[in-house]
Amino acid sequence: MAIIGLDIGGTKLLGAVFNAQGQIIDKEKNSSKAEEGFDTVMKQIHKTIDSLVERNQIKIEGIGIGVPGTVNQDGYVVFTPNLPLGDYDLAKDLSTRYGVPVRVGNDVNLGTYGEYMELGITHKNVIGLFPGTGLGGGIIINRNLYIGQGTAGELGHIVVQKDGVDCNCGNRGCLESYASKKGIIKYIQNQLKKKRECELSEDVLNGMIKSSKLKRAFDNNDEVVVEAMDQFKEYLGLGIGIIINIFNPDLIIIGGGIIDAFGPKLLDGIRKHATGYALPYLFDKTDVLSSRLGDDAVIFGGYHLIKSS
Amino acid sequence: MAIIGLDIGGTKLLGAVFNAQGQIIDKEKNSSKAEEGFDTVMKQIHKTIDSLVERNQIKIEGIGIGVPGTVNQDGYVVFTPNLPLGDYDLAKDLSTRYGVPVRVGNDVNLGTYGEYMELGITHKNVIGLFPGTGLGGGIIINRNLYIGQGTAGELGHIVVQKDGVDCNCGNRGCLESYASKKGIIKYIQNQLKKKRECELSEDVLNGMIKSSKLKRAFDNNDEVVVEAMDQFKEYLGLGIGIIINIFNPDLIIIGGGIIDAFGPKLLDGIRKHATGYALPYLFDKTDVLSSRLGDDAVIFGGYHLIKSS
């Protein structure tokens, strides 16, 4: 018997087959083709799962799925800003099609759960914070994934600057508007308007920077990029401080493309900033680690979600 | 068999005896005499418990205690800013003296638990937010009090205005600096400096306002007080928005002296502000209720803590 983990992203679909020992025995990657609409995305999802099943000649016992958006407790997808899957009973659809239990959760919730379970640690209460294009979070309480009514951990939408810059969510001053690639891009854009130079000006105009390119510009001591990364560190430290004061957790896991590209030194800088925003006694008791699974975090989370249910 | 609930405050001690049905059968109130130091405070605690035991001729099965500060998982009091009880193993001391299990928690954590348990509801995940002199919080996850490593829910120290006004905790821009009596007083003080008039000017100079007096000044349409309450509502709404985005909870309970004095209309105003800070779908699914137990919330929490252990 095998379990399928699936990570449905705005651009890519990543599926994997897990064996009884929880190891990945096969993977399948496809474009999600979000721009072609609902029917095409569903076809891509079916294709990814079908390929894995057929290629490996397996009988599956369940499918665990992460989507980039809001989900309710029953796996009904409520809202996915970058994917035409909102307002759809994805869990029921796939459960009917494949005749197995299907669980659907927010991708970063699942990614945090995957990281936590694969760390194999005894910590009970763990928070995940994943800055990427935006900023997502996940919450482990008493060794279980905490989802509230379906999608908890929208840590990127904690307002840290009342009446601050506009956020895509409709509100203002959200943590995500500073501590994510969106925030970095916005910072550089503002500097370009002031006629300053930056080696990432073209990427910024296109609205997207690869983490590796960001790291290269930083290593080249591009002044604007260094400043943008200072703001990123400062605000991610602020986010960590807030999380510590709220959860008094055992551990905070920080992950995502930027962290992976910049390595452990970045995390040290972020930790230092966090001291200015957390109650000191609580801060001293909290471990901060970087994630380890990279792009596989969500599919591992999907596997563990099925395994634990 | 009976259980004792004890609320140790900076000025008052409130103890109560609960019978097997969870009803209060006797109460005892004393000054905590914080200004006289550790030994005197301990004597006052002993006196409160002894009086309740002797007067009611009871055999107790446990004591549940709330203190205004930071506590670890074993009931060791780490830090109490307004009481000389920090760095002391209060649970062990009282457990040895009375020969029964003693549990010690943060007072607002316990207050939230008390309110939750006495509501008798089926909601699983509930957050309490209690603006008073400061702003404390409590977290119920999966029907249990969540304390992290001992003291979770320091919701007053969520930074909502980076580089904002100084907070007693040493950081800046904490929610408590706006959405509490401290915040209201600070607002009025700033207006008095601008030579504006306010009927609470004397109270503000003394650094404390009674909730009933605040309400009276508000009803008298004192301009500065109305503005201070607008800020209070706005920021408490912001706090609710943040809590919703993080926890996607079933219910938020709002309590404390100001809320009790102003009544349900105040809560409506706060809710309205919260819509500007929460993700809409999550906001729509969250109930907001005012607390019901008033000054008894913490002792009820102490009772339920012992009862549930």
Image: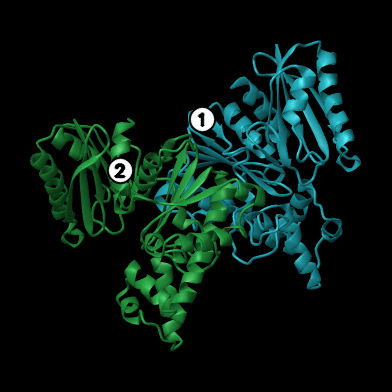
Chain colours: A green, B cyan
Q: CA distance from mark 1 to mark 2?
A: 28 Å
Q: Residue at x 15, y 60 (%)?
A: A36
Evaluate if marks 1 and 2 touch, with contact meaning CB atoms under 8 Å apart. no
- Residue B155 makes an appearance in the image: no
Residue B295 position within the rendered picture, expressed as x and y whole percent measured from the top left: 73, 34
| Position above or below: A105 against B63 | below
Residue B141 position within the rendered picture, expressed as x and y whole percent measured from the top left: 50, 35
Return the mark for residue B43: none
Work out whether residue A147 or residue A303 is closer to the camera in this orientation and state it.
A303
Which residue, given by chain and number where applicable, does mark 1 sit on?
Answer: B143
Residue A303 position within the rendered picture, expressed as x and y whole percent measured from the top left: 28, 38
Work out whether residue B34 or residue B243 is closer to the camera in this orientation and state it.
B34
| Position above or below: A196 against B18 | below
Which residue, given by chain and number where applicable, does mark 2 sit on?
Answer: A300
| Position above or below: B185 against A223 | above
Is residue B153 shown left or right of residue A215?
Answer: right
Q: Residue at x 16, y 55 (%)?
A: A30
Mark 1 or 2: in front is: 2
| Position above or below: A86 against B301 | below
- Kind of element beneath mark 1: loop
- Kind of element beneath mark 2: helix
Residue A91 position within the rendered picture, expressed as x and y whole percent measured from the top left: 24, 39
